[in-house]
Amino acid sequence: MTELERIGDQLKRALEGPAWHGPALLEVLDGVTAAQAAQRPLSQAHSIWEIVLHISVWEDVVRRRALAERVEITPEQDWPKVTDTGSAAWRRAVEALSTSNQALRDVVAAFDVRRLDQPLVPRGNTAYVQFHGAVQHDLYHAGQIAVLRKG
């Protein structure tokens, strides 16, 4: 298995499992209703829904940077607001999470391995760090979602 295949595998495991650490994102989201996703059991924390949107944003940022696009996002883009809390909108948010993960995996699979040690943006982290960072980011937030589900 090549390094890029291993990174793609880790991205997939972070989303779908099996993950070594515990439940992957889709596993921790399984059974979460739109009402639960929109709740804010900790008043100063983001909702599950907001976290799902945020993860999708960052997978897309890393994907776009890997395609040589200069991407800087605003705080509003970083943490999108949930405007529709219906069941269909929640399903679309979870589907968008899967879509953004797959799109990033596709870009990683086609990435030039010789560029792994090069920054994706000037004076930024290398492709290697950003790709692995996306995995770490997914799993960090999976843990947050697991805690919020218990709240």
Image: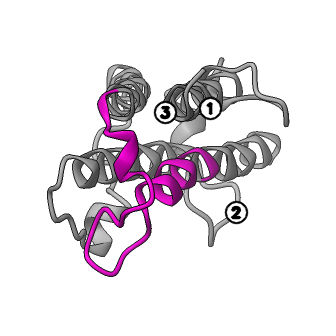
Is 39 placed above or below 96 here? Answer: below
Q: Which residue has dot 3 on it?
A: 4
Image position, residue 91 (x, y; %): 40, 21
**Depth order, front residue of 94/16:** 16
Image position, residue 72 (x, y; %): 23, 70
Q: Is residue 124 magenta?
A: yes
Q: Which residue has dot 2 on it?
A: 42
Q: Which residues are magenta?
A: 110-136
**Occupied quadrant, residue 25:** top right
Q: Which residue has dot 1 on it?
A: 10
Is 70 placed above or below 16 here? Answer: below
Task: Tell me, yes or no, whether the two marked residues, 3 and 1, touch with CB atoms within 8 Å.
Answer: no
| Colouring method of the image | one colour
The amino acid pointed to by label 3 is Leu
Q: Is residue 89 magenta?
A: no
Is 9 placed above or below 112 here? Answer: above
Which mark is in front, 2 or 3? Answer: 3
Task: Tell me, yes or no, whether the two marked residues, 2 and 3, touch with CB atoms within 8 Å.
Answer: no
The amino acid pointed to by label 1 is Gln
Q: Residue at x 30, y 53 (%)?
A: 61
Distance between mark 2 and mark 3 Cα atoms: 38 Å
Label 1 or label 2, whichever comes before in sequence order = 1
Q: Residue at x 38, y 37 (%)?
A: 85
Q: Mark 2: which secondary structure?
A: loop
Which mark is in front, 3 or 1? Answer: 3
Label 2 or label 3, whichever comes before in sequence order = 3
Direction left: furthest residue: 69
Image position, residue 39 (x, y; %): 58, 47
Distance between mark 3 and mark 1 Cα atoms: 10 Å
